[in-house]
Amino acid sequence: MNLNKAEFVIGATAPKSFVRDGLPQIAFAGRSNVGKSSTINALLNRKNFVRVGNAPGKTRQVNYFHIDQQLYLVDLPGYGYAKVSQAERDKWGRLMEAYFDSGLITRGVQIVDARHKPTADDITMVNWFKSTDCPFVVVANKLDKLKKSEIEPNLKQIRQVLELDDDVVVLPFSAEKRQGVEELRQIIFGQKGLNH
Ligand code: GDP
């Protein structure tokens, strides 16, 4: 798969705009500012393909990126930003429920902050991934901000708080330092001759 062949397709603001063409959809979820855009850019080896540092809470759409005509990376709207109105929050919830219920997700990528205990919203998202029965991976981003001695306990805490089965990978990751990128590519795109 040629990761250089990536293009933005559509930002769906309502379920009728979800892409339903049968290609795999890899869904990325995470709290605003956790580094979701940076993670997708790191995967694609791009600097600012997905805009980093977007105004938090402003992107209320499900963004589809078509990769080499073979699959979609689906950037779900970030959550957990305090200054978002209840009406906006409700709209987000309805859109997410529709997407998770759609049966369109092939694989999930839940991004959490390696420094902190997962939030209630993180737990909600992971429960949604669990409910789809599709495989998902938890990416513990911003690892570069941890002391070495903090890494193991924090990863363990993430696994415990999110109540993950043993077969769910919690991947130590830093979008900034490009740590864990190759491992995440393997998980998402598989082994077959990556060209990037
Ligand atoms: P998003 O809102 O989840 O899409 O987050 P962004 O990708 O826009 O990143 C939010 C902020 O966190 C930006 O200032 C990034 O530079 C920073 N950031 C993202 N990933 C990392 C990382 O692995 N380490 C560090 N130190 N900062 C990061």
Image (cartoon, rainbow, N blue to C red):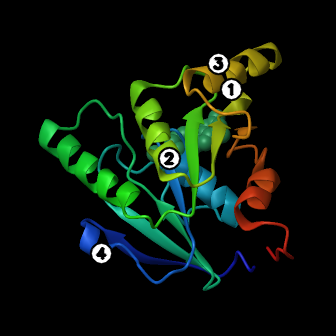
4 and 1 marks in contact (CB < 8 Å): no
Which residue is at a point 69% across and 60% down the rendered structure image? 43
Label 4: how many Cα within 10 Å (few below 14, some 14–19, many 20+): few
**In the displayed structure, does residue 151 sit left or right of residue 23?**
right
Q: Residue at position x 68%, y 57% from top?
A: 42
Say if disc 1 is inside 8 Å of ligand 1.
yes
Precedes in sequence: disc 4 or disc 1: 4
Q: What residue do we see at 57% from left, 53% from top?
A: 108
Does label 1 or label 3 sit earlier along the sequence? 1
Helix, strand or loop at label 2? It is helix
**Three-letter amino acid code at disc 2?**
Phe
Say whether residue 33 is left or right of residue 117.
left
Residue at the disc numbered 2 = 129
Q: x, y percentage for residue 141? A: 64, 37
Q: Is residue 173 visible?
A: no
- Between circles 1 and 3, the one closer to the viewer is 3
Which secondary structure, mark 4?
A: helix
Residue 7 in the image, given as x and y percentages of width and height: 53, 79
Q: Nearer the viewer, mark 2 or mark 1?
A: 2
Q: Which residue is mark 3?
A: 157
Q: Residues within 10 Å of mark 1 (few under 14, many from 20)?
A: few
Q: Which is in the foreground here, disc 2 or disc 3? A: 2
Crowd around label 2: few <14 · some 14–19 · many ≥20 (10 Å): many
User: Considering depth in this image, is 56 or 122 the residue closer to the camera?
Assistant: 122
Residue at image mark 1: 145
